[in-house]
Each structure stands twice: as C-alpha cells, then as structure tokens.
Image (cartoon, rainbow, N blue to C red):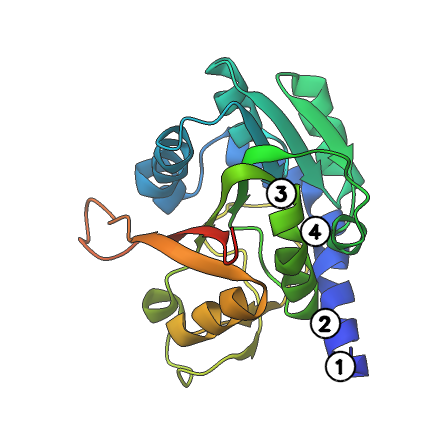
C-alpha cells in the first residue's frame, strides 16, 4: 500500500471514531432520507430473500441491521472496526458483536462462517476493501453469498469525472453534531466489477432500489458468490 493510500485509509477510521456518537443518533433517529425511504428496507429484503440461518454483518456500525435480522430469528454476528459503535451495538442487544478491523478480518481473525455476509454502505476504502473482499469467500458456508449495498456510481459521481479515485467525504443529510468527514474511494460500475473479479467473486444479481419520490436509484445492491464455488 503506498503512503497516500495508507494515509487516506487511516483517515477513514479516524473520522468514524470521531463521529461514532452523532452517527448513532442519525441512524436511530432515522434522519437520513434515502435510508428511511428506500435503502434500509432494500438491504433487509435482499438478505431475507436468501433465506439464511447465519449472517455476518461487516461494518455493522451501531448494529441496526443485525438487530432487525436477529428479530427475524437469524443468528447474526456484527463486526466493526470502531469500538464506540460496537459498544453501542452490544448495549442495544440482539445479535453478537466483535470489534475487528478489515485488516484483521482479511487475516482470518473472525472464526465464523455464514450463509450471507453483508456489507451495507461499509466499503469505503481502496486497499482495505480489496483485502477484505478477497477474504470473504472463506467466511461463507457452501452456497453462501455476499451482499453489498453501496452508493450508485451514476448518482454518487456528481460533477467529478466518472473514474475510480479518492473523493472528499460529507455528512450532508445526516443532521448536526458531525466533525471531519471520512474520505472514500469512488468506484465506477466497471470499477466495482473489476474489484469483485480480482477478489474471486462473481456477480449473480444486481438490484437498483429507487427513491420513491425522485424515481432515481437510491443505491445499488450486488449479490455475489465465490467464483469457484
């Protein structure tokens, strides 16, 4: 990993450590419109459509998705690198939670396998994401899948050139109390597909949840399986 990439990867974690409490409030108070109107429901339905018994929620944050899925009778392990978010998730119950970085997950630190691993708006970096995705097939039971929900590249590109690269972050639409935002690595649709292929994953389904008011994609959801399963 070059020094610039490492610095930006570290800045992502630093920003999330600083903003764990306002993020928890934003999620619990349902401040983020796209989540409230479209994307939360979309990821729940995508996971339940796979009829899993065990789920690993990678980048679980304060644990809202793990709680919803656990209430459906699923065995859910939530994992996040930010200790304050994991503490909040544990305090709210429903599900099991561990504080592990993506580097630790990539190194095999989690002794769990699942029918579904899910990354819900939690793939923000470059090298960290590539290492994590390469390790995901080893976290899945036979026939298991990875579900990734992320910003839709066409909607997230804005006025910047449509090419892979680092972008400045923003807490716009999340409410008050936030400080320095996290940088993030923008991937085009082709960039995502190349990343998945290089990680040993193949796309078996793509969904584009629509915002009910604008009719435009609120996100994109990839359902992936190990390429050699």
> Is the Cβ of the residue at disc 1 closer than 8 Å to that at disc 3?
no
Residue under the image location 20 percent in, 44 percent down: 212
Question: Between disc 4 and disc 1, whose residue precedes?
Answer: 1
For the residues labelled 2 and 3, the Cα–Cα distance comes to 20 Å
Question: Between disc 4 and disc 3, whose residue precedes?
Answer: 4
Seen in the picture, residue 164 relative to 51 is either above or below; the reply is below
| Pointer 1 residue | 4
Q: Is residue 152 left or right of residue 29?
A: left
| Pointer 2 residue | 8
Assess disc 3: are there few (<14), some (14-19) or many (≥20) residues with their C-alpha within 10 Å of its C-alpha.
many
> Which one is in front in this view, the residue at disc 4 or the one at disc 3?
3
Where in the figure is residue 190, as x and y percent of width and height?
40, 75
Assess disc 1: are there few (<14), some (14-19) or many (≥20) residues with their C-alpha within 10 Å of its C-alpha.
few
| Circle number at residue 16 | 4
Mark 4, secondary structure of its residue: helix
Q: Nearer the viewer, residue 50 or 215?
A: 50
Where in the figure is residue 95, as x and y percent of width and height?
64, 21
Seen in the picture, residue 8 relative to 38 is either above or below; the reply is below
> Is the Cβ of the residue at disc 1 closer than 8 Å to that at disc 2?
yes
Q: Nearer the viewer, residue 23 or 143?
A: 143
Mark 2, secondary structure of its residue: helix
For the residues labelled 1 and 2, the Cα–Cα distance comes to 6 Å
Q: How many marks?
A: 4
Mark 1, secondary structure of its residue: helix
| Circle number at residue 172 | none
Where in the figure is residue 22, as x and y percent of width and height?
63, 41
Residue under the image location 51 percent in, 39 percent down: 144
Where in the figure is residue 221, as x and y percent of width and height?
38, 51
For the residues labelled 4 and 2, the Cα–Cα distance comes to 13 Å
| Pointer 3 residue | 58
Q: Picture quarter containing residue 169?
A: bottom right
């Amino acid at each position: 990993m070059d020094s610039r990439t490492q610095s930006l990867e570290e800045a992502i974690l630093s920003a999330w450590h600083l903003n764990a409490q306002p993020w928890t409030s934003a999620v619990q108070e349902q401040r983020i419109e796209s989540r409230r109107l479209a994307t939360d429901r979309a990821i729940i339905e995508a996971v339940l459509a796979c009829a899993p018994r065990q789920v690993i929620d990678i980048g679980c944050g304060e644990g809202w998705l793990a709680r919803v899925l656990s209430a459906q009778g699923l065995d859910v392990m939530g994992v996040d690198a930010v200790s304050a978010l994991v503490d909040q998730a544990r305090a709210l119950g429903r599900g099991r939670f561990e504080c592990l970085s993506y580097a630790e997950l990539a190194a095999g630190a989690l002794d769990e396998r699942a029918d579904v691993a899910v990354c819900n708006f939690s793939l923000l970096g470059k090298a960290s994401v590539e290492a994590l995705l390469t390790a995901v097939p080893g976290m899945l039971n036979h026939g298991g899948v990875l579900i990734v929900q992320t910003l839709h590249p066409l909607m997230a590109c804005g006025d910047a050139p449509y090419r892979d690269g680092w972008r400045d972050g923003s807490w716009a639409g999340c409410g008050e109390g936030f400080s320095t935002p996290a940088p993030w690595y923008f991937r085009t649709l082709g960039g995502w597909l190349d990343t998945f292929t290089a990680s040993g994953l193949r796309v078996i389904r793509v969904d584009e949840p629509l915002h009910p008011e604008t009719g435009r994609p609120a996100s994109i959801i990839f359902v992936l399986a190990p390429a050699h399963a």
